[in-house]
C-alpha cells in the first residue's frame, strides 16, 4: 500500500484532506487494559474534489465511523498491516469542504503506545497505572489520526477514569467532575490550543501527587518520589527563563513534569505542558537535571518548529541538544557547555563506529526511511551529529553573538510549522547571505554522508583534564602498591566521574585487580547516580569481570530507559559465556518493558519472534 509522498512512515494524505482539530472522549479501562470511546476529527478538504480521508491506525478495533452533522454511517476500509501500521480509508460525504467525523473505537491490549502497570508494578502498590509514549509513530495505535509530524492540530479531551486516580495529558487541565456512568468514576477535561503533531498527544493515569516548583510549574509523581523530584527539578524556572532569553517567548502556558514509573523507555519526552521524565534522573544532587533543560528546549526545537518527517529528525534533536548546552553554559559557565559535549562525543563514537557502523546509511544526518520503522533508526546520530553541525555553523559565522540571534529569528519564522532540512538551509543562507564563510559549507556531506561528523569543535577541555589524568594513573598503577588518593575522585562533579569512567571504557580492558581496588576505594557499586553506576558496570563487563554481570542484568531490568538497557544487554550478550544469561533474563522480563524497549532489545539479542 502506498505511503504518503510527504512522509515515508505515514499513509495519510494531508495534501488532500487535513485534520484541523482532534477531540478525544475516552474511558480508561484497567480491567481490559484498553481505552474505549471515540475521536471527533474536524477535517478540511484541501483538494475540494477529495472523496476520502486517509488516517493511520494500528491494531485498533473500529466500531463505527459517522458524519457528525447527519449521524450517517460512513463507509471505510482498513488495509493490510505493515511496519507503519495500517491504512484507514474513509469515504466522505459529497458536500462541504469542512467536515466532522466521529470514529468510535477501542485500543488493543497490545497497543504499542500504552504501558499498563498492575498495582504491584507501581511504587505505591495499591493502584494501577497507565502512560503513553507516542513518538515516533505509535499514536496511531492509540488514536486514529494523520500520524505524521507534518500535520499539526490543536486538541481537546474528556477522559473517564477511576475516581481515586489522577489523569494528566499534554494539555492544560480543566474541570474535573463526577461521571454520569458511576460514582466511582470522574471526568477529566483538557485543552491544548497550540497546534501539535500527533506524537505529542500524551496521557498518564495513576495515583499521582504534585508539588509546585515554580510560577508555571508543578512536578507530579507517585507519592513515594514527589518530594525527591521537587528537589532535583527545583531549577526548572531558571532553565525556562534562560531558554526564553535564547529562543523567544514560551507559548505553552504551563510547564509541568511527570516522573513516570521506571519502565518509561526514555530520559524524557517533551510532551507540551507535561514533560515525561524517567525516575533515573533522581540522583539527589540535581546532577541529571540537564535532561529537563533538554526537554524545555524542545518547547521551541521540535514542538514549535518541527521536522516534517522522521528523516529530518535532527531538526528536532540536534537543535535541542545544542540549545540544552547553551542553557547549561549560561547557568553554569561556558566550560560546562563544552564539557557536556566532550562527554557525549564518546557516546556518539560508540553509536557510529561500533553499534551501527560508520558506513551505515542510518548514520547520515538525513537518512532515507522508506520502508524503515523510525524506531529502528533511532540513535544518538540526530542528537549529537546534529548538534555538532550547528556548533560548526556557529563557529563558521562568527560565534554565539552572531549565531544566537539567527536561531531566535529561525524559531520565529517557522513557529507552528513543520519543515525539512532544505528549508533550514535556505533560511540560513538567506540570513547569512553577506557572510562569505558560508560558501565553505559542504551541505551534501553534512546531510547525506554516513559516519562521524566531518568537524570536531575545539572544545574547552579544562574540566576534563583531571578526569583523563586520573584515568591514566589507573591504567599505569600497580594496585598492590599505593593507590591514588580517594579525594581525587570524590572531588569530581558527577559529570567528571562519568568522563573518568568513560575514558577507561574506551581504553584497553583494566586488570581485575584494578577493578577490585577501584570498587573498594570509590564504592562504585553503591553510587546513587545511575549514569555513574551504568558506566562502572560497563567498565567491568568490558574486562569480563564476573562481579559486573549480576548488577548489569539487575540495572537492565529494574528500569526501562533504553539508554541503559540496550548497552547493558548488548555487553553481556557479547561475552560468549554469559550470552544465554542475557537472553534468559530478557525473556523473563520482556513483559515488564514498554513495547519499543522490548522490540529493540530483542533485535540487539538477535531474538526473532
Image (tube, rainbow, N blue to C red):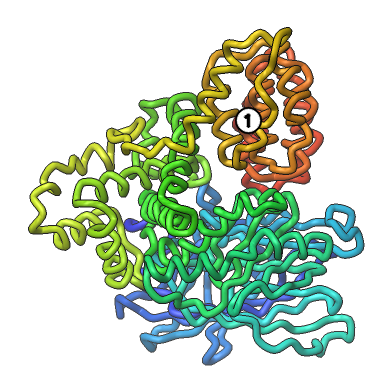
Q: Residue drawn at (51%, 26%), measured in percent from left and top?
A: 468
Nearer-the-camera pick, 581 or 331: 331
Where residue 71 sits: x, y (%)?
A: 58, 88
Q: Residue drawn at (49%, 78%), measured in percent from left and top?
A: 154
Q: Which residue is mark 1?
A: 488
Image quarter for residue 148? bottom left
Image quarter for residue 574? top right
343 horizontally vs 569: left or right: left
Q: Residue drawn at (62%, 11%), measured in percent from left and top?
A: 477
In the rendered image, the vertical position of residue 361 relative to residue 140, given as above or below: above
Nearer-the-camera pick, 337 or 22: 337
| Total residue callouts | 1
Pick the quarter of the image with the C terminus: top right
Q: Residue drawn at (81%, 89%), measured in percent from left and top?
A: 178
In the rendered image, the vertical position of residue 265 relative to residue 25, given as above or below: above
Where residue 465 sits: x, y (%)?
A: 47, 30
Whether residue 321 is visible, yes or no, is: yes
In the rendered image, the vertical position of residue 139 relative to residue 370, given as above or below: below
Outermost residue on the right side: it is 126
Nearer-the-camera pick, 33 or 269: 269
Where residue 24 sits: x, y (%)?
A: 61, 78
Nearer-the-camera pick, 476 or 217: 476
The local crowd at label 1, few if under 14, some if 14 to 19, many if 20 or more residues have their Cα within 10 Å, is few
Whether residue 313 is visible, yes or no, is: no
**Quick one: SS at disc 1?**
helix
Amino acid at each position: 500500500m502506498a505511503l504518503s509522498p510527504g512522509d515515508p512512515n505515514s499513509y495519510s494524505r494531508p495534501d488532500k484532506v487535513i485534520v484541523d482539530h482532534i477531540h478525544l472522549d475516552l474511558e480508561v479501562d484497567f480491567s481490559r487494559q484498553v481505552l474505549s470511546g471515540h475521536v471527533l476529527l474536524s477535517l478540511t478538504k484541501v483538494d475540494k474534489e477529495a472523496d476520502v480521508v486517509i488516517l493511520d491506525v494500528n491494531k485498533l478495533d473500529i466500531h463505527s465511523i459517522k458524519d457528525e452533522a447527519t449521524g450517517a454511517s460512513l463507509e471505510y476500509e482498513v488495509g493490510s498491516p505493515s511496519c507503519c501500521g495500517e491504512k484507514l480509508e474513509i469515504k466522505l460525504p459529497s458536500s462541504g469542504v469542512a467536515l466532522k467525523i466521529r470514529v468510535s473505537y477501542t485500543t488493543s491490549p497490545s497497543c504499542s503506545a500504552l504501558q499498563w502497570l498492575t498495582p504491584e508494578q507501581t511504587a505505591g502498590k495499591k493502584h494501577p497505572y497507565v502512560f503513553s509514549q507516542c513518538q515516533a509513530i505509535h499514536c496511531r495505535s492509540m488514536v486514529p489520526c494523520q500520524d505524521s509530524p507534518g500535520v499539526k492540530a490543536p486538541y481537546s479531551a474528556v477522559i473517564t477514569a477511576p475516581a481515586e486516580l489522577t489523569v494528566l495529558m499534554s494539555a492544560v487541565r480543566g474541570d474535573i467532575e463526577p461521571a454520569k456512568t458511576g460514582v466511582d468514576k470522574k471526568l477529566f477535561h483538557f485543552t491544548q490550543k497550540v497546534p501539535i503533531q500527533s506524537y505529542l498527544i500524551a496521557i498518564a493515569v495513576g495515583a499521582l501527587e504534585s508539588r509546585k516548583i515554580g510560577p508555571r510549574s508543578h512536578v507530579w509523581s507517585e507519592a513515594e518520589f514527589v518530594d525527591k523530584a521537587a528537589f532535583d527539578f527545583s531549577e526548572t524556572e531558571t532553565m525556562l527563563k534562560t531558554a526564553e532569553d535564547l529562543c523567544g517567548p514560551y507559548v505553552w502556558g504551563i510547564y509541568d513534569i511527570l516522573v513516570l514509573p521506571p519502565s518509561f523507555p526514555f530520559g524524557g519526552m517533551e510532551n507540551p505542558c507535561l514533560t515525561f521524565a524517567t525516575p533515573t534522573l533522581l540522583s539527589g544532587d540535581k546532577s541529571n537535571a540537564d535532561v529537563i533543560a533538554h526537554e524545555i528546549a524542545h518547547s521551541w526545537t521540535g514542538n514549535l518548529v518541527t521536522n516534517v518527517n522522521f528523516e529530518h529528525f535532527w531538526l528536532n534533536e540536534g537543535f535541542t541538544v545544542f540549545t540544552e548546552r547553551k542553557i547549561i553554559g549560561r547557568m553554569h559557565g561556558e566550560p560546562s557547555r563544552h564539557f557536556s559535549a566532550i562527554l557525549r562525543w564518546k557516546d556518539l563514537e560508540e553509536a557510529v563506529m561500533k553499534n551501527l557502523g560508520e558506513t551505515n546509511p542510518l548514520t547520515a544526518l538525513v537518512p532515507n526511511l522508506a520502508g524503515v520503522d523510525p524506531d529502528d533508526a533511532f540513535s544518538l546520530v540526530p542528537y549529537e551529529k546534529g548538534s555538532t553541525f550547528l556548533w560548526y555553523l556557529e563557529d563558521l559565522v562568527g560565534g554565539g553573538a552572531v549565531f544566537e540571534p539567527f536561531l531566535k529569528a529561525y524559531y520565529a519564522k517557522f513557529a507552528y510549522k513543520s519543515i525539512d532540512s532544505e528549508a533550514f538551509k535556505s533560511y540560513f543562507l538567506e540570513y547569512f547571505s553577506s557572510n562569505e564563510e558560508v560558501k565553505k559549507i559542504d551541505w551534501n556531506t553534512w546531510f547525506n554522508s554516513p559516519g562521524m561528523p566531518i568537524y570536531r569543535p575545539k572544545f574547552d577541555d579544562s574540566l576534563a583534564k583531571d578526569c583523563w589524568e586520573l584515568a591514566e594513573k589507573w591504567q599505569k598503577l600497580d594496585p598492590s602498591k599505593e593507590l591514588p588518593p580517594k579525594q581525587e575522585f570524590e572531588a569530581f562533579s558527577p559529570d567528571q566521574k562519568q568522563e573518568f569512567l568513560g575514558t577507561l571504557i574506551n581504553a584497553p580492558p583494566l586488570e581485575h585487580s584494578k577493578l577490585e581496588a577501584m570498587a573498594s576505594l570509590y564504592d562504585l557499586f553503591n553510587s546513587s547516580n545511575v549514569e555513574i553506576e551504568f558506566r562502572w558496570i560497563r567498565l567491568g563487563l568490558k574486562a569480563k569481570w564476573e562481579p559486573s554481570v549480576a548488577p548489569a542484568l539487575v540495572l537492565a531490568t529494574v528500569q526501562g530507559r533504553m539508554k541503559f538497557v540496550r548497552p547493558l544487554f548488548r555487553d553481556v550478550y557479547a561475552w560468549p559465556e554469559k550470552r544465554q544469561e542475557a537472553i534468559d533474563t530478557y525473556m523473563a522480563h520482556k513483559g515488564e518493558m514498554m513495547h519499543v524497549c522490548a522490540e529493540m532489545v530483542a533485535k540487539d539479542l538477535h531474538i526473532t519472534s
